[in-house]
Image: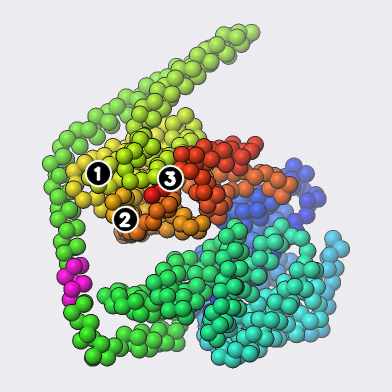
Amino acid sequence: MKRITNILILLFVATTAWGEATKEQIAYLDSLYKIAYYNYSTNEGLAYLDKLIEGSKKYGIRKYETSALQLKAGSYINLGYHNRIKELADSVSEAGMKETASKNTYYYIKFILSQSYSYQGKYKLSMNVAQELYDDSHGYETEEPDTNRNGQMRMPTKIVNRLNALSCLGTAEGYMGHYEKAIDYYNECIEITDKWPTLLAAERRDAFDGRMLASLKTRDSETKLRYAHEFEDYMQIYKKTKTDDLSADENYMMYEFYIHDAYVEIYTSTGELDKAEEHVASMRQILNVTKQAYDNLAGTFYSTMASYCMARNDYNSAFTYADSAAYYLHGYDSGAELEVLKIKLKANHMRRNYMRDYDIAQEVLTLGDSLAQETRNSSIDEISTLMGMDKLEMEAQEAEIKQNRRLAFIAIGAILLIASSIVYIQRQKRHSEKEKRKMLSEQNELLAREVEKQTRELREKNERITIQNGKLDEKNKIISESNREMTASINYAKRIQSAMLPDVEKLSEGKDLEGLFAFFSPRDIVSGDFYWAREHRDEILLACADCTGHGVPGAFMSMIGTTILNEICSHVDKIEPSEVLKVLDAQTIEFLSQKDDESVNDGMDMAFVTYNPKSMEMRYALARRPLYVVRNGEIKEIKGTKRSIGDRDDKSSKISFEGGEMKMERGDMVYMCSDGLADQFGDIDVEHPHGKRMKSAGLKQLLLRISKEPVENQKEAIGKALEEWMGECVQTDDVTLVGMRV
């Protein structure tokens, strides 16, 4: 069962003097708070919250610390960091915050902890925490709002605790399938908010929303429609009376999204698919313009689309949507993830891909084992029913399954043959590779010594010049000369790096291919990004990589990646993208000696693609970088494996690089890029004085826009769009993008 919580609240932080703090200190903390708020529910925002808490303790301004803790709890649940929520709750309990003036922060974090337990399927723990909030709300009936020292009305703690307890109990009961109980809890919430509809507008909105979502799981279509209509009517009133906080527009769009989602579920269950389709279009439109809450809404959208496609008997699309939904829900909402895995299993079974049934069923059972016992039992029953094919059906499919197994064994044998060939070639080259590494190591050592020597000499020159009073002109002359020499050296390195980059436009000539282009913009003179391309038999090989670091260190990594790629693809007949990344990963780790604990953890993120213009088949493997395909005005994002090339983390090293393939159509655009565009700051305005990131949603909109241009104009269009977005902001990262129109 889906559930959204009113986490994004506007917290007020005083900007007047507090205790012994100076105006400068308060201004510093206030700026940290605003930056953290603008970057809510991001890892960057969490980093600023840590700085805010540290500064708050240092300058003795408690209010900033409590505000930061509340924002932290909200960010953790939105990002799916459930373990951190438990740690945060334990820390405020140990600090005795419940007995201080900051008790509201203590209770708010407990509220988030209860919701987090429900998302993880730990319903008993969720209800235990909710019971604590409920017990601490006794006597709320006699409480009335009061006024704080700033003249603002505020609700008593007991009333807030009662509402939060009822909300948590409603969430837990809904996840456990007790929908009538959940609706009763939300109705009680609404009765309390009836008394103060303006002061409790957010809580009232969430109660209407929760009741609607619980009703969707009942069998009564009239009840579903009635509660959906009531929530929609309330949201129209809320829209007219809401205050303009920092994210009001996106918050409201989120609730509109869930209203449309409810109607899709209702009309899908009643078989009125034409009515459902209208609301599907509205959901997609809202998702495309959402920024901060994109990941949360994407999980819901793909889940709903999976059910909708199942109702339309479009099992291939249902399988794809369910797979995408599981990706976004993994680690965030285990209960919802289990539901979409069941849909994925049903869709796979209906499209007669029986060999995969058992693997997907194991995914369902594995996840079910981590949830409550009743969830696990229902999962087993559902799988047993689905997998219980009768004898006649099994006999009819036996020949097909045997044939599929034979083809699978042939494919595995081919892969093993390729792997054996690569191992043999690598053994033959090992001696020469060691010599090359030794030579490169010696050259790096000589370079490091030379840099150290030049640095020491420059320091000595500066010290001598400083002693000589009045000789500033001479000092500037020496520094200028040193800078020119250093710049000349780096420019020479740039020429070397540029010479290693392929001419992708020329590579497309004479092929049954409309065109290729590469946009390459280093942050410094040399780049830690690189792109790579070559022709191999009937295929075109493309790669786009983002190496660790910028400038000279990143450039060294890019040259290493280019060299190893050339070696790998020069000694095999058949290029398998996943095998290329696997061998590249192993050789990068060996090259950098990253097996020792004291070694650095350098590496690269990469998208690797092969395309056959004759068969129009594209195969790919992705290491922490996505692949974008634009077809008929719609963009599809293919997520990458959550592992980098050269990553020696124990957990990451167990993840294999998975490959995929796709049949292309004339006019399709394929894009691969580093993270420079999505992370670039720009679009400065009154609400964003420091700019904001383009993010994944902005990047997709940009790619959709330029995809309409002829391929020979897209490189210039990317450069112009980047310049307009940055405005007065500086470039923060290397930017690389490769595009191909088939």
Q: Nearer the viewer, residue 565 or 665?
A: 665
- Identified at 84% across, 60% down, the residue is 150
Circle 1 — which element? strand
Q: Amino acid at mark 3?
A: Gly
- Identified at 57% across, 60% down, the residue is 288
Mark 1 residue crowding within 10 angstroms, few (<14) / some (14–19) / many (20+): some
**Looking at the image, is 412 positioned above or below residue 543?**
below
Q: Quadrant of residue 245?
A: bottom right
Marker disc for residue 739: 3
Q: Nearer the viewer, residue 590 or 318?
A: 318
**Looking at the image, is 671 positioned above or below residue 368?**
above
Marker disc for residue 536: 1
In the displayed structure image, the side of residue 264 where residue 256 appears, left or right: right
Circle 3 — which element? strand
- Does any portion of residue 649 appear in the rendered image? no
**Looking at the image, is 326 positioned above or below residue 191?**
above
State which region is magenta.
402-408
Q: Amino acid at mark 2?
A: Glu
Marker disc for residue 7: none
